[in-house]
């Protein structure tokens, strides 16, 4: 009987809470670029901006050119009614490289610590120079990392390792 009462209370709490809680959806887009003032995903970004939907955007640093700040300006400064930034720009690698010699390695898996640290540094510097932001989040190309990636991220103290 005691178990049945606890279950009933838990069920009532869940129903009550879900009636008032808004679901949380995470929108993660990656492989962002901008060249010659063109962004291929502009219609998606504009829809998210219009509807004030938060999103997380993974940028490949080498694929940004001098037009990046102008192209991404509306998204860099966008905020919701609470003043929270709508768009987070995160590090999705310097060049999104793959099939690197000698073992068909990926940018952050199978490559040396020096290589990975260099790519993190170059991507951070390029995005800061072209977009004026310091990225604090990282998502590896192809979602593949190794122990060198963790070490390289630890060297970049503005990334939080969880």
Image: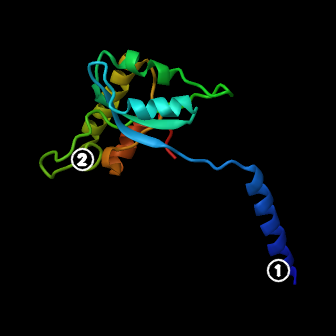
Could you say which quadrant of the image residue 124 lies in?
top left
Q: Is residue 76 above or below residue 1?
A: above
Residue 138 visible, this angle: yes
Residue 146 image point, x, y percent:
33, 51
Q: Nearer the viewer, residue 158 or 44?
A: 44
Q: Which mark is residue 3?
A: 1
Residue 90 visible, this angle: no
Q: How many marks?
A: 2
Q: Classify mark 1: residues with Cα within 10 Å, few (<14), some (14-19) or many (20+).
A: few
Side of 24 relative to 151 (left or right): right
Q: Is residue 139 above or below residue 42?
A: below
Q: Nearer the viewer, residue 46 or 98?
A: 46
* Colouring rule applied to residues: rainbow
Q: Which mark is residue 106?
A: 2
Side of 43 relative to 117 (left or right): right
Residue 81 image point, x, y percent:
67, 27
Side of 72 relative to 111 (left or right): right
Residue 11 image point, x, y percent:
78, 68
Q: Is residue 5 above or below residue 79?
A: below
């Amino acid at each position: 009987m005691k178990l049945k009462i606890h279950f009933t209370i838990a069920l009532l709490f869940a129903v009550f809470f879900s009636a008032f809680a808004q679901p949380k959806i995470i929108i993660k887009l990656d492989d962002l670029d901008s060249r010659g003032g063109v962004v291929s995903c502009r219609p998606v970004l504009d829809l998210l901006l219009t509807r004030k939907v938060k999103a997380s955007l993974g940028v490949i640093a080498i694929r940004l050119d001098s037009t990046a700040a102008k192209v991404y300006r509306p998204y860099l400064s966008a905020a919701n009614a609470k003043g929270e930034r709508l768009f987070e720009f995160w590090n999705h690698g310097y060049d999104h490289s793959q099939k690197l010699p000698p073992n068909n390695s990926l940018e952050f898996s199978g490559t040396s610590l020096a290589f990975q640290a260099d790519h993190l540094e170059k991507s951070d510097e390029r995005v800061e120079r072209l977009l004026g932001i310091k990225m604090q989040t990282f998502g590896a190309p192809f979602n593949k990392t190794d122990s060198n990636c963790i070490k390289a991220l630890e060297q970049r103290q503005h990334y939080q390792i969880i």
